[in-house]
Image (cartoon, grey):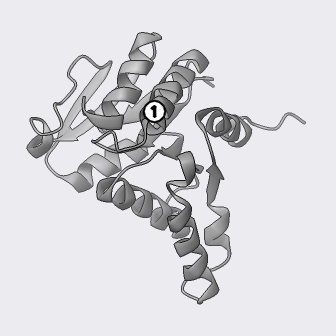
Amino acid sequence: MSSQKSICVYCGSRNGKNKAYSDTARQFGHLLADAGWRLVYGAGDVGLMGEVARAAQARGGETFGVIPVHLVRREVGKTDLTSFVITETMHERKKVMIMNADAVVVLPGGPGSLDELFEALTWRQLGLHDKPIVVVNVGGYWTPLRDLLDQVITQGFADRSLGDFVTWVDDAEAAMAALRSSLTPAIG
């Protein structure tokens, strides 16, 4: 069994207003490469997507990018990746990304990142996968989302187990620690 893991990263195609978002994306890319793990992401060379990919590449990390044909120009498809896949639709993109990953990490992002997170979370709730989902709450960016998920649970629209499917961390190092903990088999 290979020790290399593949981590699907959902994040913004913009950098956002807080420099900490870009810093965290770069640090996470470095940490993935240093661990010998492969980055699976949306194949863009803009925003946080570009930051995490360039950082992983700078440290010699493997990169697996997936982009729909209609976004190749808009998100500046990063063709110098280890693997570069072009899909027909956004849905295919999300499916290829999650199917080629052992876990999901969510950095700050916009509607696309939310869409990706909720699809991964819904698929986990439905038992279509059991991959860890780690949300990196840089500077409290995702705190309103965490509150919303708590509201969904407390108001009876999801079981308490939904909250157990997401691990909330504050930075890149904590994300790696959570991944190591959930992806390392127990030795007994």
Residue 15 is drawn in which quadrant?
Answer: top left
**Position of residue 99 in the picture relative to residue 178 (left or right):** left
| Residue 38: x %, y % from top left | 47, 25
Q: Report helix, strand or loop for mark 1.
A: helix
The mark total stands at 1
**Position of residue 182 in the picture relative to residue 62 (left or right):** right
Quadrant placement of the C terminus: top right
- Eyeballing the image, is 123 above or below 138? below
- Eyeballing the image, is 57 above or below 178? above
Residue 160 is drawn in which quadrant?
Answer: bottom right
Specify the farthest residue to the bottom.
Answer: 155
| Residue 126: x %, y % from top left | 51, 70
Residue located 31% across and 59% down the image: 111
Residue located 29% across and 20% down the image: 81
Q: Is residue 126 visible?
A: yes
Residue topped by disc 1? 25
- Eyeballing the image, is 157 above or below 136? below
Residue located 52% across and 56% down the image: 129
Residue located 25% across and 28% down the image: 45
Q: Nearer the viewer, residue 25 or 35?
A: 25
| Residue 99: x %, y % from top left | 41, 45
* Residue type marked 1: Ala
Q: Residues within 10 Å of mark 1 (few under 14, many from 20)?
A: many
Q: Is residue 137 visible?
A: no
